[in-house]
Amino acid sequence: MSSFTTAAATMQVLSIAAMEEASRRGQRDADLEHLFLALVLSDQSAGRALRAAGVTLTGARDAVDAMHSDQLRAIGVAVDQPAPGRIVFHETRGYEWTPRALNLLKHAGDKGGGDAAAVLRELLAEPSGLIADLLARLSLSVDQVETALTIEQSTPPPERPADAAATPRAVTGRTEVFVPASVETVWALVADPLRMPEWNPSVGTIEPDGNDHTDTATVGSSWLAITPTVHPDGKPARVKREFRRRRVQLVDTAELVRIAWQTSYPDTTRGTANVLSIELTPAPGGTQLRLAMSWARSRGWRRIVGWPLRPLQRFLAWLGLVQIGGGISRVFR
């Protein structure tokens, strides 16, 4: 992955997480503290380093709330902050970075390649003292976090098994996401087809699939997923009638380790079936998910015509996986 692609992907993921955190407090501007919270959730080395140093999402949120309360008291405002609500970023509009946060992200891209580690280093060096204050509230120092990041970056990545979704003739998109919940809790969500509308934005409701329906998900069992006609923000979703229904079938499972769902279109022969694979690995503070989306390559002339579009297909698959991973994470935040 090029440095430009890395920076763009990092910006996308961090922006979503930071603005989701801002939305819990009814804020539309994401600032440095929200960027810090997004890094705590990052699946990259920066997030792993923060969690290895003992930073949890709950602890970081509490530190941010305490800092804001102290800042208000310092100017003579003594009011109790309202309790945070749920994440509504995906249901609302009008979010943006503050100028100093946007400037920091630009420097991270220009100087350090733009990955999450570069963003964290820029944040640790930021001159306002905000991050040093937050870390002190978490019983940490800037030096301790820098050391944890250096150690994390020098540790070889773990070997990964082959994707359950991949086949020799498949096109596959991939991403990873950290979820602040135990493997058992995350598994209970992703392995239950009836809970799929909670985390998959393309699923509005789940219905029985005729005689194939069972109450327990076993390999081969299937359900019908109905695509929502309205986006979470209230805007209509344009979905052709023949693509409204999707057959979701369990094609692979190993309890607490991996699961794969195949999606096909029973009302048309034009739709291409795809397989979503989710692999779960215990991690400090939660669960690391490895997501892969795979679909068969076209044959004959369609394959030749479609070849130039392969990078775009992979990008769109990655974008869809980011939304799915974000949906899973959101359930536990």
Image (tube, rainbow, N blue to C red):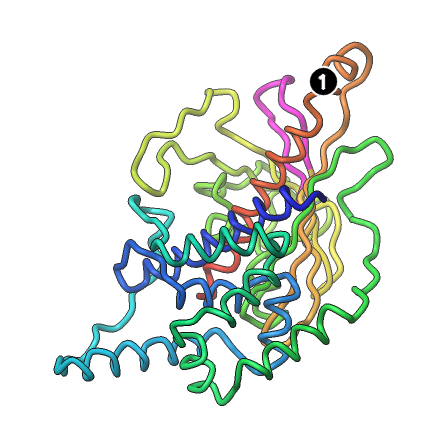
Asked if residue 266 is among those painted magenta in the image, a careful observer would answer yes
Residue located at (63% from left, 17% from top): 270
Magenta stretch prevailing secondary structure: loop
Q: Percent x, y for residue 321?
A: 59, 45
Q: Which residues are magenta?
A: 261-274
Of 172 and 257, nearer the camera is: 172
Q: Is residue 262 magenta?
A: yes
Q: Kindly tell me whether residue 170 is visible in this rendering.
A: yes
The residue located at (73%, 13%) in the rendering is 305
**Residue designated by label 1:** 306
As rendered, which of 300 and 60 lies closer to the eye? 60
In this image, 312 relative to 230: left or right?
Answer: right
At 45% from the left and 80% from the top, the residue drawn is 132
Instruction: Tell me if residue 95 comes above or below residue 22 in the rendering.
Output: above
Foreground of the two, 229 or 119: 119
Which residue is located at x 73 percent, y 38 percent?
172
